[in-house]
Image: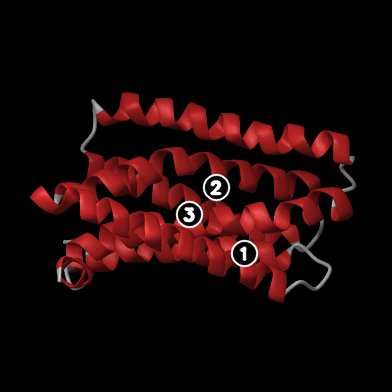
Amino acid sequence: MVYLRMLSNRRFMGLTLSGVLPMAGMFAYIAGSPFVFMELLQVAPAHYGLFFGGNAVGIMAVSQLNAWLSTRQPPERVLLFGLLSMAGAGIALVLFAHGGSFLGVVVPLFVYVASIGMVMPVASALAMASQGRTAGSASALIGTLQFTGGALAGGVVGALHDGTAMPMAVVIAVAGTAGLLSRLILVR
């Protein structure tokens, strides 16, 4: 019954989806980036981990920026900034990935992945805050939806594999843009 109430709560679902959907894009990156980096961009397997690790450092850096911003800006504004960054990076990835440009893939991916450090904590905190005493159940639902979205996104990237970066890029762009739209349309 608690989950049904949460699933029918427009604000909770808007905030939840604004974190869950971009996280699905993160799983698309995890599923598609080894092929894109090593096969298409000709990054040596020994160096792929450096790019993957660099994006992880980006998440940590943006998480720290988020902590600083959150004391100076309302969390809703911080979330919107992060979602705009992710949607923009996803769209840029689609526009530049088709040409196989190294920087056209690496830079938008870095911005998208690093922005997870801003979007996920704020979206989750705002969604759980709206649930009061059932915040623990809200956290469990958010986690379940995150991994469900991640599994679906990774599966879609694999199913659409066509020897290009486009399946990964499109799933990332759709996920980031859908997260932004969830925030704009559902949260009032």
**Residue at x 30% of width, y 48% of height:** 124
CB atoms at circles 1 and 2 under 8 Å apart? no
The answer to whether the residue labelled 3 contacts the one labelled 2, judged by CB atoms less than 8 Å apart, is: no
Whether pointer 1 and pointer 3 mark residues with C-beta atoms closer than 8 Å, the reply is no
Whether residue 176 can be seen here: no
* Disc 1, SS: helix
Which label belongs to residue 45?
none
- Residue at disc 3, secondary structure: helix
Q: Position of residue 128 (x, y in %)?
A: 21, 49
Horizontal arrangement in the rendering, residue 1 relative to residue 40 (left or right)? left
Quarter of the picture containing the C terminus is: bottom left
Q: Which residue is mark 3?
A: 23
Q: CA distance from mark 1 to mark 2?
A: 16 Å
In terms of depth relative to the viewer, which is nearer, 86 or 36? 36
Q: Residues within 10 Å of mark 1 (few under 14, many from 20)?
A: many
Residue 26, x across and y down, in percent: 55, 52
Report whether 30 appears left or right of 88. right
Residue that badge 1 annotates = 154
Q: Which residue is drawn at the image coordinates 69% and 38% (left, top)?
A: 52
Q: Nearer the viewer, mark 3 or mark 2?
A: 3
Locate the N terminus by quadrant: bottom left
User: Is 85 displayed left or right of 128 in the figure?
Assistant: right
Q: Residue at x 43, y 66 (%)?
A: 178
Q: Amino acid at mark 2?
A: Tyr
Q: Mark 3 or mark 1, which is nearer the start of the sequence?
A: 3
Closer to us: 112 or 132: 132
Q: Amino acid at mark 3?
A: Met
Residue located beneath label 2 in the image:
112
Q: Amino acid at mark 1?
A: Gly
Give the Cα separation between the discs numbered 3 and 2. Answer: 10 Å
Q: CA distance from mark 1 to mark 3?
A: 11 Å
